Image (cartoon, rainbow, N blue to C red):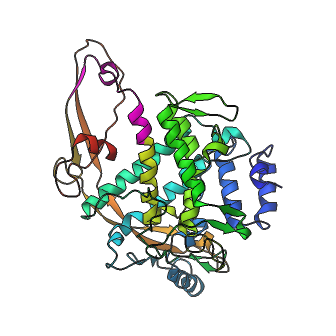
Amino acid sequence: MCLFCSIPGMRNVEDLQSCAVFARDRINPYLFNYALSVALLHRKDTHDLDLPTIIEVFPDKYVDSKVFSQIREEATVVPEGMRMPIVIPKDYTASDLDEEHRLWYFREDIGVNLHHWHWHLVYPFDASNRAIVDKDRRGELFYYMHQQLVARYNFERFSNRLQRVKRLNNLREPISEGYFPKLDSLVASRAWPGRVDSSVLKDLNREADQIKQDVADLERWIDRIYEAIHQGFVVDESGNRIPLDEQKGIDHLGNIIESSILSPNRQLYGDMHNMGHVFISYAHDPDHRHLESFGVMGDVATAMRDPVFYRWHSYIDDIFQEHKNKLPPYTRSQLTFDGISITGITVQPEDGQQNTFQTFWQQSDVDLSRGMDFVPRGNVFARFTHLQHSPFVTTIMIENDSDAQRMAFVRVFLAPKNDERGTPMVFRDQRLFM
C-alpha cells in the first residue's frame, strides 16, 4: 500500500481518520506524519485545520538531546501546574574556535527551520495526485524562497564580520565546514551523525537505502542544465523544445533543478538539488560501512542548521542568475508607473530612532508533551532563545499626478548598504541580496 497515495485519496474525513488510525502504529512515524500533514493541507475538507508544528510532534529534531532527561524528570516528579519551562541551551553545538558558529542563532533557529519544513509540505516535489504538486509558479517559488533565505543569511554574515557565502560549485573540493548537530533521534534511538571538516563527497553505494549514485552523475546533470540555459530551451521526453523565456522559463528551470514530477525530462536533467542534499548528508558514510544514517542535510526539517546548506543553495541561486542574465532587460514601460511617483519612505519603530530597526533576544515557550513517549500526561514546556524585533510602521509618501484613483501594489526590497569589507555595495551586487 502506498501511504502517500491512500491518505490524500480518502473519500471523506471519516475514511481519512480511519486510514490514519490504522497506519499510525504500523509504519515509520516520520513517514506517517509527512503523508498525513500533506494530505490535511491539500484536501478541501481539512486544509483550514491548524496542524501541530513538527517541534511539538518530533522535538528531537530541534532540541538538544541533554534536555530530554530534564523534561522526563519534570514530567514525572513535578505535578502539572507547578512545572517550570526547561531552558534549551543556546550556543551549544560548537565553540568560538569555529567562526561559522557565530551564526548559530540563525541556522539553528527553530522558527526558520519550521518555515523550511512547512514550505516543503505546501510544495512537495512528488505526489500521486499531480494537482498537489502542480501549483502556480511552483518552480519559480522554489528559487525565490531559497534565494531569500540565502540573502537574509548573508545579511547576518556581514553583521558578524564574515564573508558572504562561498558557493559549493566544485563537488570534488573538500567541504571545509564541519557540523555536529548534537541531536538524538527518539524514533531511531540514535544520534544524528555529524560531518568532519574537509569532508569530500564520494559516490554513494548504500544498498540498504536503495541508493547507488555517482558524483559524476550530479556533475553531468549540472552541465546539461547550463547547456539548456545557454541554448534557451529544454527538451522534454518526446524531444520537443520548451523555451526558457521570461514568462515561464524560470518556472520550468525550478522544476528541473529541484526535480519535481513536473520536470519535463527527469531522465535527461536528473535530480540535481535533491541528490545534492543526499550526497552531502551521506558524506560521513557513503557506502554504509559504518551503518550510519543520513545527516541533517537529508531532512527538510533540519537542513538549515548546517552551514553547507547555504553554500549549496548559493550555487543553485547562481544557476538561476545565469538564466536571468540571458533574458532581455526590462523595458521602461515595465519599470515605470505613469503619473505615480514615490517621494519618500520612513520606518518608525515603536520605541526608538526613525529608520532604525531594533532587534533583541527573546525567549519563547513551546509545549513538547505530544512528542514525549512514556512520560506522564500534561504540558511540559521548553524555553528557547531567538532573535526578535520591535514592531515598526513603514510610511511611504506617494504623489498621484494622474487626476484619477489608481490601484497599486507595493513591494519593499531590503538589501545591505555595505559589503563584508564595510564599503558601499554596487547595485549589480546589491540586487542579489534583495
As displayed, is residue 378 above or below residue 78? above
Taking depth in this image into account, of 375 and 2 the one nearest to the observer is: 2
Residue 332 forms part of the magenta stretch = yes
Quick check: can you spot residue 414? yes
Q: Which residue is painted at 46% across and 66% down in the image?
A: 306
Q: Which residue is painted at 31% across and 38% down in the image?
A: 412
Quick check: can you spot residue 110? no
Q: Is residue 180 left or right of residue 17?
A: left
Residue 367, given in percent of the width and then of the height, sits at: 53, 69
Q: Which residue is painted at 25% across and 61% down in the image?
A: 159
Q: How many marks?
A: 0
Residue 4, given in percent of the width and then of the height, sits at: 74, 52
Q: Is residue 95 left or right of residue 319?
A: left
User: Which residue occupies the extreme right position in the image?
Assistant: 1
Q: Quadrant of residue 265?
A: top right
Q: Which residues are magenta?
A: 321-342
Residue 336, given in percent of the width and then of the height, sits at: 29, 22
Classify the position of the N terminus by image quarter: bottom right
Residue 295 forms part of the magenta stretch = no
User: Which residue occupies the extreme top position in the image?
Assistant: 403
As displayed, is residue 29 above or below residue 394? below
Q: Which residue is painted at 28% across and 61% down in the image?
A: 163
Residue 208, given in percent of the width and then of the height, sits at: 73, 70
Classify the position of the C terminus by image quarter: top left
Q: Quadrant of residue 216?
A: bottom right
As displayed, is residue 304 above or below residue 10? below
